[in-house]
Image (cartoon, rainbow, N blue to C red):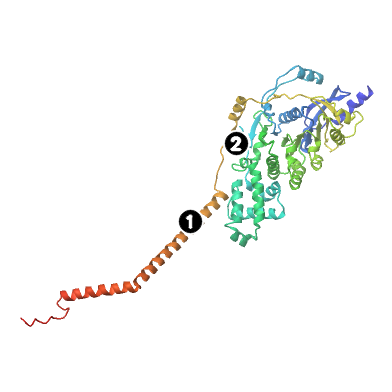
Amino acid sequence: MADKEKFLQSIKDGYTFKGETFRIGLGMLDKETVAGADVFLALKTMNRHGLIAGATGTGKTKTLQVLAEGLSDASVPVVLMDIKGDLSGIAAAGSSNPKIEERMKLMGMEYKPSSFPTELMTLSSNQKGVRLRATVSEFGPILLSKILGLNDTQQGIVAMIFKFCDDNKMPLIDLKDFTKTIQYISDEGKDSIEKDYGKISTSSTGTILRKVIELQQQGADDFFGEPSFEVDDLMKIGDDGRGVISVIRVMELQDRPKLFSTFMLSLLAELYASLPEEGDMDKPKLVMFIDEAHLVFQEANEALLQQIETVIKLIRSKGVGIFFCTQNPQDVPASVLAQLGLKVQHALRAFTAADRKVIKQASENYPTTEYYDIDELLTQLGIGEAFITMLNEKGIPTPLVHTMLVPPRSRMDVLNDAEIDTLVGKSKLVKKYANTLDNESAYEIITAKLEEAAEKTKAAEEEKQQAKEEKKTAANEKGFFDNPVVKQVGRTAANMITRSLLGALGLGGRSRKKSSWF
């Protein structure tokens, strides 16, 4: 009993915060709930990022849903990266069942189903929702080079391409513009480019082009273009005062991790670049949840990982929180994991020696506790239960607590096609970004230049050929009249003509002598 009272007091002390909070569950000891051991999250600390981890089927997605609902209620906009396609149900009210009623009774709470203001977004023309795009120019040479995994020499060429396009007022809108420029500086424009910008290695431009084609093969052409998405449209408040939840449906990116990491990094970089410094805020301006986060890091090169780590470190000062959701904490690089203040650890499975090693490593990431054997309990947590710890206002970790989590109030399933059509049909943002723009950019400008040059070359060739033909004709004519036979024929003809004319005038020929017999 004393232990339970001590446990209860430690939870009350550890999870009582100044400022606005919302409840996510009830503390458990010896696998039983402890009345009064309420676990709250402080909105003030939600920009310190977080991790939701656990094996398949342990309730990670539902935990993500609960956090998104609590933030929305507090007028905080939320972005959900929905890579499995199971988060759209947050736009519809949930429904009760015996298991939910039993859980709510244990927590001393009443279940109140609710839908939440939601925007469906997509990177693909095949999905319904707000189309997300960005231009190549918005990426800039440094970020684009990191995404493509280029070396220093190749990065220099990319920087030169951007400078060349800026100097000549040729916008880089999509990858078609970028590849056309690479081809131009490698061939027709190489001499003039090298004169103004320095030597260019054809092998380097060939490597860059191959890297771009690799990105295109993962569907990047759908993402690059206009109109580019404005990040302010992710930070909307609904008519009822709740934060809008933007569900970015990227189910087709499960087998295209490079495009997924490209999109994520570009979005984070755009948020960081466009938002002002805020310092400590009472609640975040935006919180983003990245489901299946291992895809962000799966094919990321060292430079890209470093860029992600830098953005994660700095973006919290802009009032933005980032939460990674994945099966294993080890999926997240240690340098990024160290930046995550809130940790929600669902059950892990110990089927192999490698699994047990992972569990051992995971348990070492949490504060020491006298109430739990972490290694053992990690494999025994029930569905909808998790270990939780976070940073308080002073940056000190709260006590590790085995928590029974509240169920989502929105639907724990997906929307059907008719519901998606209705939701998309009401959206003003869908209409805003519906039509792809094809403004004049580098591709059209370079193509026009090459066509103009080709026309001039063709005209010059035709003029040269005509002059050649005329010269040949003149030479043939001169050769004809210089021929001795032609000259003799000409002289004979001239003499005959002359005699005929003179004869007609009575001036030509000699007089005949009369015959003697006359």
Q: Residues within 10 Å of mark 2 (few under 14, many from 20)?
A: few
Eyeballing the image, is 36 above or below 400?
above
Return the residue at label 1.
455
Q: Along the line of sight, which residue is nearer the eye, 256 or 99?
A: 256
Q: Amino acid at mark 1?
A: Glu
Residue 432 location, quadrant: top right
Q: Position of residue 104 (x, y in %)?
A: 78, 20
Q: Position of residue 290 (x, y in %)?
A: 73, 35
Residue 383 location, quadrant: top right
Q: Which mark is residue 510?
A: none
Q: Amino acid at mark 2?
A: Ser
Answer whether residue 193 is visible to the viewer in this image: yes
Eyeballing the image, is 438 above or below 64?
below
Chain-order first, disc 1 or disc 2: 2
Q: Which mark is residue 125?
A: 2
User: In which quadrant will I find the C terminus?
Assistant: bottom left
Q: Is residue 486 left or right of residue 72?
A: left
